[in-house]
Amino acid sequence: MQADSSGSARTVAEAVAAARPQRSPLRGRTALVTGGSRGLGREISIAFAAAGADVAVVSRKKDACDQLAGELADATGRRVTAHGAHVGEWERLPALLDEVEESLGPVDIVVNNAGIAPVYPSLTEVSEQLFDKVVGVNLKGPFRLMALAGERMASRDGGAILNISSMASGRPTRSDLPYAAAKAALNTLTAGFAQEYGPLVRVNTILAGPFFTDISSAWDMDAFEQMAETWPSKRGGDPSEIVGAALYLCGPTSSYTTGSLLAVDGGRLAAP
Protein backbone atom coordinates (compact mmCIF):
# COMPACT_ATOMS: atom_id res chain seq x y z
CA MET A 1 0.00 0.00 0.00
CA GLN A 2 1.06 3.57 -0.68
CA ALA A 3 0.58 6.30 1.91
CA ASP A 4 0.19 10.03 1.34
CA SER A 5 1.08 12.91 3.67
CA SER A 6 -2.23 12.61 5.51
CA GLY A 7 -1.48 9.01 6.45
CA SER A 8 -4.17 7.52 4.22
CA ALA A 9 -3.25 4.77 1.81
CA ARG A 10 -4.57 3.28 -1.41
CA THR A 11 -4.63 -0.33 -2.41
CA VAL A 12 -2.59 -1.78 -5.25
CA ALA A 13 -5.79 -2.08 -7.30
CA GLU A 14 -6.52 1.62 -6.79
CA ALA A 15 -2.95 2.53 -7.75
CA VAL A 16 -3.13 0.41 -10.90
CA ALA A 17 -6.46 1.97 -11.90
CA ALA A 18 -4.99 5.46 -11.45
CA ALA A 19 -1.92 4.53 -13.51
CA ARG A 20 -3.82 3.19 -16.53
CA PRO A 21 -3.24 5.39 -19.62
CA GLN A 22 -6.07 7.78 -20.40
CA ARG A 23 -7.39 7.64 -23.93
CA SER A 24 -7.98 11.40 -23.95
CA PRO A 25 -5.82 12.90 -21.18
CA LEU A 26 -6.47 16.47 -22.32
CA ARG A 27 -10.22 16.19 -22.87
CA GLY A 28 -11.99 19.31 -21.65
CA ARG A 29 -8.83 21.40 -21.93
CA THR A 30 -8.16 24.37 -24.22
CA ALA A 31 -4.60 24.84 -25.47
CA LEU A 32 -2.93 27.78 -27.19
CA VAL A 33 0.22 26.86 -29.13
CA THR A 34 2.46 29.59 -30.53
CA GLY A 35 4.50 28.72 -33.59
CA GLY A 36 1.85 26.05 -33.90
CA SER A 37 1.64 25.64 -37.66
CA ARG A 38 5.02 24.01 -38.35
CA GLY A 39 7.91 22.13 -36.81
CA LEU A 40 7.65 21.15 -33.16
CA GLY A 41 4.60 23.38 -32.67
CA ARG A 42 2.71 21.55 -35.40
CA GLU A 43 3.42 18.20 -33.78
CA ILE A 44 2.31 19.50 -30.38
CA SER A 45 -0.89 20.98 -31.84
CA ILE A 46 -1.72 17.66 -33.51
CA ALA A 47 -0.93 15.62 -30.39
CA PHE A 48 -2.99 17.86 -28.11
CA ALA A 49 -6.05 17.69 -30.36
CA ALA A 50 -5.64 13.92 -30.65
CA ALA A 51 -5.52 13.80 -26.83
CA GLY A 52 -8.88 15.55 -26.61
CA ALA A 53 -8.01 19.24 -26.30
CA ASP A 54 -9.45 22.11 -28.26
CA VAL A 55 -6.50 23.92 -29.82
CA ALA A 56 -5.71 27.48 -30.93
CA VAL A 57 -2.95 27.35 -33.55
CA VAL A 58 -0.99 30.59 -33.55
CA SER A 59 1.75 31.85 -35.86
CA ARG A 60 2.64 34.84 -38.00
CA LYS A 61 1.44 32.99 -41.11
CA LYS A 62 -2.33 32.88 -40.78
CA ASP A 63 -2.76 30.86 -43.98
CA ALA A 64 -0.64 28.03 -42.58
CA CYS A 65 -2.66 28.13 -39.35
CA ASP A 66 -5.92 27.98 -41.31
CA GLN A 67 -4.79 24.92 -43.24
CA LEU A 68 -3.63 22.98 -40.20
CA ALA A 69 -6.68 23.99 -38.15
CA GLY A 70 -9.06 22.76 -40.84
CA GLU A 71 -7.30 19.45 -41.35
CA LEU A 72 -6.91 18.86 -37.63
CA ALA A 73 -10.53 19.63 -36.82
CA ASP A 74 -11.66 17.20 -39.53
CA ALA A 75 -9.31 14.48 -38.33
CA THR A 76 -10.02 14.73 -34.61
CA GLY A 77 -13.48 16.26 -34.27
CA ARG A 78 -12.05 18.84 -31.87
CA ARG A 79 -12.51 22.58 -32.12
CA VAL A 80 -9.34 23.99 -33.69
CA THR A 81 -8.96 27.70 -34.48
CA ALA A 82 -6.33 29.66 -36.40
CA HIS A 83 -4.84 32.95 -35.25
CA GLY A 84 -2.29 35.17 -36.96
CA ALA A 85 -0.03 36.87 -34.43
CA HIS A 86 3.59 37.90 -33.96
CA VAL A 87 4.45 37.00 -30.38
CA GLY A 88 7.14 39.66 -30.26
CA GLU A 89 4.48 42.39 -30.49
CA TRP A 90 3.75 43.25 -26.86
CA GLU A 91 0.35 44.86 -27.37
CA ARG A 92 -0.91 42.11 -29.68
CA LEU A 93 -0.95 39.42 -27.00
CA PRO A 94 -3.86 40.59 -24.80
CA ALA A 95 -6.07 40.73 -27.89
CA LEU A 96 -4.81 37.30 -28.97
CA LEU A 97 -5.86 35.77 -25.67
CA ASP A 98 -9.25 37.46 -25.93
CA GLU A 99 -9.75 36.12 -29.46
CA VAL A 100 -8.91 32.57 -28.44
CA GLU A 101 -11.13 32.63 -25.36
CA GLU A 102 -14.04 34.11 -27.33
CA SER A 103 -13.74 31.19 -29.77
CA LEU A 104 -12.86 28.28 -27.50
CA GLY A 105 -13.48 29.38 -23.92
CA PRO A 106 -10.94 29.81 -21.10
CA VAL A 107 -7.40 28.82 -22.01
CA ASP A 108 -5.83 26.43 -19.50
CA ILE A 109 -2.75 25.33 -21.47
CA VAL A 110 -0.25 27.66 -23.13
CA VAL A 111 2.72 26.40 -25.13
CA ASN A 112 5.35 29.05 -25.85
CA ASN A 113 6.93 27.37 -28.86
CA ALA A 114 7.50 30.24 -31.32
CA GLY A 115 11.18 30.97 -31.73
CA ILE A 116 13.80 32.24 -34.16
CA ALA A 117 17.54 31.70 -34.44
CA PRO A 118 18.81 33.80 -37.37
CA VAL A 119 22.19 33.03 -38.92
CA TYR A 120 24.84 35.74 -38.75
CA PRO A 121 28.38 35.85 -40.21
CA SER A 122 30.21 36.85 -37.01
CA LEU A 123 29.50 38.17 -33.53
CA THR A 124 30.61 41.69 -34.46
CA GLU A 125 28.15 41.64 -37.34
CA VAL A 126 25.12 40.91 -35.14
CA SER A 127 22.98 43.99 -35.63
CA GLU A 128 20.93 45.61 -32.92
CA GLN A 129 17.84 44.89 -35.00
CA LEU A 130 18.66 41.16 -35.19
CA PHE A 131 19.46 40.98 -31.47
CA ASP A 132 16.23 42.75 -30.51
CA LYS A 133 14.20 40.52 -32.84
CA VAL A 134 15.67 37.35 -31.32
CA VAL A 135 14.98 38.57 -27.78
CA GLY A 136 11.50 39.76 -28.75
CA VAL A 137 10.31 36.41 -30.08
CA ASN A 138 12.22 34.04 -27.78
CA LEU A 139 11.94 35.92 -24.49
CA LYS A 140 9.79 39.05 -24.46
CA GLY A 141 6.78 37.39 -26.08
CA PRO A 142 6.79 34.35 -23.79
CA PHE A 143 7.17 36.61 -20.75
CA ARG A 144 4.16 38.68 -21.77
CA LEU A 145 2.01 35.67 -22.65
CA MET A 146 2.90 33.84 -19.43
CA ALA A 147 2.02 36.92 -17.37
CA LEU A 148 -1.33 37.43 -19.10
CA ALA A 149 -2.39 33.80 -19.35
CA GLY A 150 -1.01 32.86 -15.94
CA GLU A 151 -3.02 35.57 -14.22
CA ARG A 152 -6.22 34.40 -15.93
CA MET A 153 -5.54 30.74 -15.12
CA ALA A 154 -4.76 31.51 -11.49
CA SER A 155 -8.03 33.38 -11.13
CA ARG A 156 -9.95 30.33 -12.39
CA ASP A 157 -9.17 26.64 -11.98
CA GLY A 158 -5.48 26.81 -12.84
CA GLY A 159 -3.63 25.41 -15.81
CA ALA A 160 -0.28 24.54 -17.34
CA ILE A 161 2.30 26.59 -19.20
CA LEU A 162 5.00 24.91 -21.28
CA ASN A 163 8.00 26.76 -22.67
CA ILE A 164 10.05 25.30 -25.50
CA SER A 165 13.63 26.26 -24.78
CA SER A 166 16.82 24.78 -26.20
CA MET A 167 19.85 22.79 -25.18
CA ALA A 168 21.75 25.79 -26.59
CA SER A 169 20.86 27.56 -23.32
CA GLY A 170 23.33 25.21 -21.64
CA ARG A 171 25.63 24.52 -24.61
CA PRO A 172 25.93 27.84 -26.49
CA THR A 173 28.16 28.27 -29.53
CA ARG A 174 29.44 31.34 -31.35
CA SER A 175 26.80 30.82 -34.03
CA ASP A 176 23.77 31.04 -31.71
CA LEU A 177 24.70 33.32 -28.80
CA PRO A 178 21.74 35.78 -28.91
CA TYR A 179 19.34 32.84 -29.24
CA ALA A 180 21.07 30.84 -26.50
CA ALA A 181 21.05 33.84 -24.16
CA ALA A 182 17.34 34.43 -24.73
CA LYS A 183 16.56 30.76 -24.10
CA ALA A 184 18.68 30.74 -20.92
CA ALA A 185 16.62 33.70 -19.71
CA LEU A 186 13.45 31.80 -20.61
CA ASN A 187 14.64 28.98 -18.34
CA THR A 188 14.92 31.53 -15.54
CA LEU A 189 11.40 32.82 -16.23
CA THR A 190 10.13 29.26 -15.87
CA ALA A 191 11.23 29.14 -12.24
CA GLY A 192 9.93 32.64 -11.52
CA PHE A 193 6.49 32.13 -13.02
CA ALA A 194 6.14 28.74 -11.33
CA GLN A 195 6.64 30.56 -8.03
CA GLU A 196 4.34 33.45 -8.94
CA TYR A 197 1.32 31.46 -10.11
CA GLY A 198 1.67 28.26 -8.09
CA PRO A 199 0.03 26.15 -6.88
CA LEU A 200 -2.81 26.47 -9.38
CA VAL A 201 -0.63 27.07 -12.46
CA ARG A 202 2.27 24.79 -13.30
CA VAL A 203 5.10 26.16 -15.46
CA ASN A 204 7.68 23.88 -17.07
CA THR A 205 10.19 23.93 -19.89
CA ILE A 206 11.48 21.48 -22.47
CA LEU A 207 15.13 21.90 -23.43
CA ALA A 208 14.82 20.82 -27.04
CA GLY A 209 17.77 19.36 -28.87
CA PRO A 210 18.40 19.30 -32.62
CA PHE A 211 15.22 18.18 -34.37
CA PHE A 212 14.81 17.61 -38.10
CA THR A 213 12.33 20.42 -38.77
CA ASP A 214 12.31 22.77 -41.77
CA ILE A 215 15.12 24.74 -40.09
CA SER A 216 17.44 21.75 -40.36
CA SER A 217 17.52 22.12 -44.15
CA ALA A 218 20.23 24.75 -43.63
CA TRP A 219 22.50 22.41 -41.63
CA ASP A 220 25.79 21.02 -42.89
CA MET A 221 24.66 17.42 -42.57
CA ASP A 222 28.15 15.91 -42.76
CA ALA A 223 29.30 18.09 -39.86
CA PHE A 224 26.06 17.40 -37.98
CA GLU A 225 26.34 13.63 -38.30
CA GLN A 226 29.96 13.74 -37.15
CA MET A 227 28.98 15.78 -34.10
CA ALA A 228 25.99 13.53 -33.35
CA GLU A 229 28.30 10.53 -33.05
CA THR A 230 29.47 11.98 -29.71
CA TRP A 231 25.92 11.95 -28.26
CA PRO A 232 24.27 8.98 -26.55
CA SER A 233 21.50 8.90 -29.19
CA LYS A 234 23.93 9.42 -32.10
CA ARG A 235 21.24 11.18 -34.15
CA GLY A 236 18.91 14.13 -34.44
CA GLY A 237 15.28 13.95 -33.39
CA ASP A 238 12.11 13.47 -35.39
CA PRO A 239 9.66 16.29 -34.54
CA SER A 240 7.11 13.74 -33.29
CA GLU A 241 9.55 12.80 -30.52
CA ILE A 242 8.75 16.04 -28.66
CA VAL A 243 5.16 14.90 -28.12
CA GLY A 244 5.58 12.57 -25.15
CA ALA A 245 7.26 15.21 -23.01
CA ALA A 246 4.75 17.90 -24.01
CA LEU A 247 1.76 15.69 -23.18
CA TYR A 248 3.31 14.77 -19.86
CA LEU A 249 4.10 18.32 -18.77
CA CYS A 250 0.67 19.65 -19.79
CA GLY A 251 -1.35 16.65 -18.66
CA PRO A 252 -2.67 15.25 -15.39
CA THR A 253 0.20 12.85 -14.68
CA SER A 254 2.63 15.75 -14.09
CA SER A 255 0.52 17.25 -11.29
CA TYR A 256 3.57 17.45 -8.97
CA THR A 257 5.95 18.79 -11.63
CA THR A 258 6.49 22.54 -11.90
CA GLY A 259 9.46 24.83 -12.39
CA SER A 260 11.29 22.00 -14.13
CA LEU A 261 13.62 21.89 -17.13
CA LEU A 262 13.28 18.62 -19.06
CA ALA A 263 15.92 17.87 -21.70
CA VAL A 264 14.60 16.19 -24.85
CA ASP A 265 17.83 16.33 -26.81
CA GLY A 266 19.07 12.83 -27.49
CA GLY A 267 21.59 13.23 -24.69
CA ARG A 268 23.30 16.29 -26.20
CA LEU A 269 23.57 18.00 -22.81
CA ALA A 270 25.01 14.84 -21.30
CA ALA A 271 27.66 14.48 -24.00
CA PRO A 272 31.30 15.43 -23.31
Image (spheres, rainbow, N blue to C red):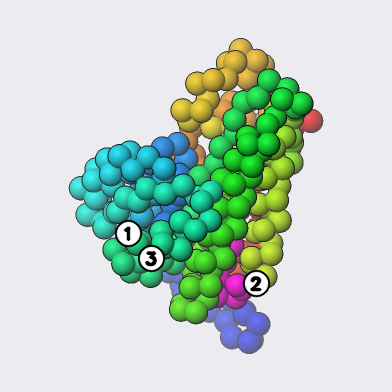
Q: From which residue to which does the magenta span run?
A: 196-204
Give the farthest residue toward the right.
272
Q: Amino acid at mark 1?
A: Asp
Q: Amino acid at mark 3?
A: Asp
Query: Is residue 198 highlighted in magenta?
Result: yes
User: What residue appears at the point 52 percent right and 66 percent down from the top-left corner?
Assistant: 148
For mark 3, what is the residue?
A: 98
Q: Amino acid at mark 2?
A: Glu
**Precedes in sequence: disc 3 or disc 1:** 1
Q: Please tell me whether mark 3 or mark 2 is closer to you in this view.
A: 3
**In terms of image quadrants, where is residue 42?**
top left
Q: Position of residue 12 (x, y in %)?
A: 51, 72
For mark 2, what is the residue?
A: 196
Q: Quarter of the image for the N terminus: give it.
A: bottom right
Rendered position, 88 above or below 131:
below
Instruction: Please give the label number shown on residue 54.
Output: 1
**Precedes in sequence: disc 3 or disc 2:** 3
Quick one: label 2, few (<14), some, or many (20+) residues within 10 Å?
some
Residue 89 left/right relative to 51: right
